[in-house]
Amino acid sequence: MKPEGAAAAPSRAVKAAPHGDGQGRLSTVTLCIDGASRGNPGDAAIGVLVRADHSIVREIAERIGVATNNVAEYKALLRGLEEAASLGAATVHIQSDSELLVRQIQGKYKVRNETLIPLYREALARLRRFDHVHIFHVPRTRNSGADGLANRALDAKN
């Protein structure tokens, strides 16, 4: 899902996928996701680190235009799920430092913000496509890879 009007840095493959099915598909991936906004709303970007068997499979750093931090967090989730689906993953582990996003996806918090509702619904629809999904809140210090990617996208010149 490419955001409208956003200048995006291309994602890049870092290593060949380990322990796949021989056809480039992976059974399990871990997504480390982060959204960043300089200003709220302001210039925003996403960072997604895709791991399989403790190896980095993809790094995604993309600008998404002007957005709030919470919108950027959801866009990072959606982009990560898109990548996991393209890799053929059946099981997805998601790590985010956004307590709001994680608790909303877990059903522990209600989604009241009108801007987040369609993103939330899209995320649930995409999550249903996987056999198993686990989403975890992690401290910001444990999400530095995704945070760094989001900030790299923000720092990149158009």
Image (cartoon, rainbow, N blue to C red):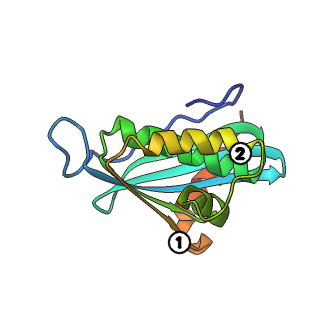
Residue at the image position 19 percent from the left and 51 percent from the top: 19
Question: For the residue marked with disc 1, what is the amino acid?
Answer: Arg
Residue at the image position 56 percent from the left and 65 percent from the top: 144
Q: Position of residue 20 (x, y in %)?
A: 20, 46
Q: Considering the numbered disc 1 on the image, is that residue within a helix, a strand or a loop?
A: helix
Q: Considering the numbered disc 2 on the image, is that residue within a helix, a strand or a loop?
A: helix
Q: Position of residue 148 (x, y in %)?
A: 60, 58
Question: For the residue marked with disc 2, what is the amino acid?
Answer: Leu
Q: Is residue 44 left or right of residue 104?
A: right
Residue at the image position 69 percent from the left and 30 percent from the top: 6
Q: Is residue 93 left or right of residue 25?
A: right
Q: Is residue 137 above or below residue 60?
A: below
Q: Which mark is residue 116?
A: 2
Residue labelled with disc 1: 142
* Other-residue count near label 1 (Cα within 10 Å), few / some / many at <14 / 14–19 / ≥20: some
Q: Is residue 117 visible?
A: yes
Residue at the image position 37 percent from the left and 47 percent from the top: 14
* Other-residue count near label 2 (Cα within 10 Å), few / some / many at <14 / 14–19 / ≥20: some
